[in-house]
Image (cartoon, rainbow, N blue to C red):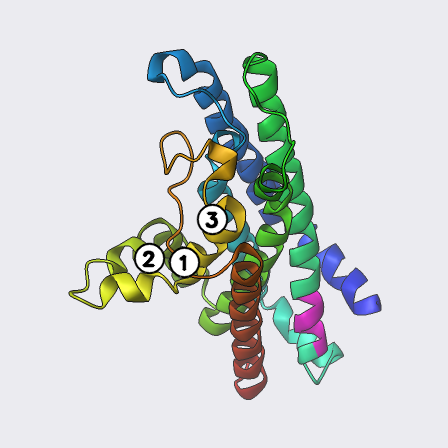
């Protein structure tokens, strides 16, 4: 537990968690407010899913949070003292992932429910009650997804080590890379069905029940993953664990 406490102090002594957490909150609440205010013009009534329209930008912020928690230590050299205090390295790195995931979970829950609440206040006549499993999953499920995303970020940070490279990779991948895969002739669509962020979208959005059955519109485009929502989250969790394991293995094998 002392390693977790140590990593918590180190993480919150820099600006990264506050900036990333604040950005995630704004990224989720802002689009929710816009979709609620423009519902009459677009003729698409707000839904529970539309309140989470900014989820992808929030996810980018959390991925960066996890990566920067690692690369900032490599940049400043404090990683040397960390490894001197914990020669085995992996317990300290695992503690870092736990702290980042715990904070990301809290940010995800706060951002998702804040976005939903903002939409309810701005569109009081819309049907935004959380009265089904799908409604609860797309809102409350943001926390677990953000926690796993932070673990992915830590893994990527350990593999790349440099802030610029990690930031570039973790911004480009969620916003563009998985969609570009679909352009690959013949195999592109089949590959895309098993991409991690496409899978986790299946966990959150299911078959569109929380968006009145619509695909896209004022909510995230539905996933074509063949997995059920529960297995989709498990698949994303497995990817997060593999990235973290690969990052820890690399950190143990090479000099800090």
Residue 182 visible in the displayed image:
yes
Q: Residue at x 46, y 45 (%)?
A: 207
Mark earlier in primary sequence (1, 2): 2
The mark found on residue 60 in the picture is 3
Within-10-Å neighbours for mark 1: few <14, some 14–19, many 20+: many
Within-10-Å neighbours for mark 3: few <14, some 14–19, many 20+: many
Percent across and percent down for residue 57 are: 45, 42
Percent across and percent down for residue 252 are: 59, 84
Nearer the observer, disc 2 or disc 3?
2
Tell me whether the residue at label 2 lies in contact with that at label 3, contact meaning CB atoms closer than 8 angstroms: no
Residue under circle 2? 178
- As drawn, which residue projects farthest toward the bottom? 253
Residue 154 visible in the displayed image:
no
Q: Tell me where the magenta segment starts and ends, as one range.
A: 91-96
Q: Residue at x 49, y 55 (%)?
A: 200
Mark earlier in primary sequence (2, 3): 3
Of the pair 81 and 184, the residue shown nearer to us: 184
Element under label 2? helix
Apparent side of residue 90 relative to residue 61 in the rendered image (left or right):
right
């Amino acid at each position: 537990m002392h390693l977790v406490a140590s990593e918590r102090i180190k993480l919150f002594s820099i600006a990264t968690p506050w900036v990333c957490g604040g950005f995630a909150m704004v990224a989720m609440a802002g689009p929710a407010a816009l979709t609620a205010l423009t519902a009459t013009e677009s003729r698409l009534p707000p839904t529970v899913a539309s309140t989470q329209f900014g989820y992808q930008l929030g996810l980018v912020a959390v991925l960066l949070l996890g990566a920067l928690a690692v690369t900032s230590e490599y940049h400043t050299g404090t990683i040397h003292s960390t490894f001197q205090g914990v020669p085995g390295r992996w317990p300290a790195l695992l503690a870092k992932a736990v702290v980042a995931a715990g904070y990301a979970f809290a940010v995800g829950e706060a951002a998702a429910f804040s976005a939903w609440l903002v939409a309810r206040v701005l569109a009081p006549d819309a049907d935004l009650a959380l009265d089904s499993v799908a409604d609860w999953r797309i809102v409350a499920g943001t926390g677990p997804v953000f926690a796993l995303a932070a673990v992915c970020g830590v893994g990527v940070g350990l593999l790349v080590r440099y802030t610029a490279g990690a930031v570039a990779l973790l911004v480009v991948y969620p916003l563009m890379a998985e969609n570009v895969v679909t352009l690959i002739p013949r195999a592109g669509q089949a590959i895309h069905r098993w991409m991690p962020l496409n899978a986790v979208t299946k966990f959150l959005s299911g078959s569109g029940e929380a968006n009145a059955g619509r695909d896209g519109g004022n909510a995230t485009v539905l996933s074509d993953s063949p997995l059920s929502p529960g297995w989709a989250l498990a698949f994303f969790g497995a990817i997060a664990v593999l990235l973290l394991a690969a990052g820890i293995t690399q950190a143990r094998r090479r000099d800090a």
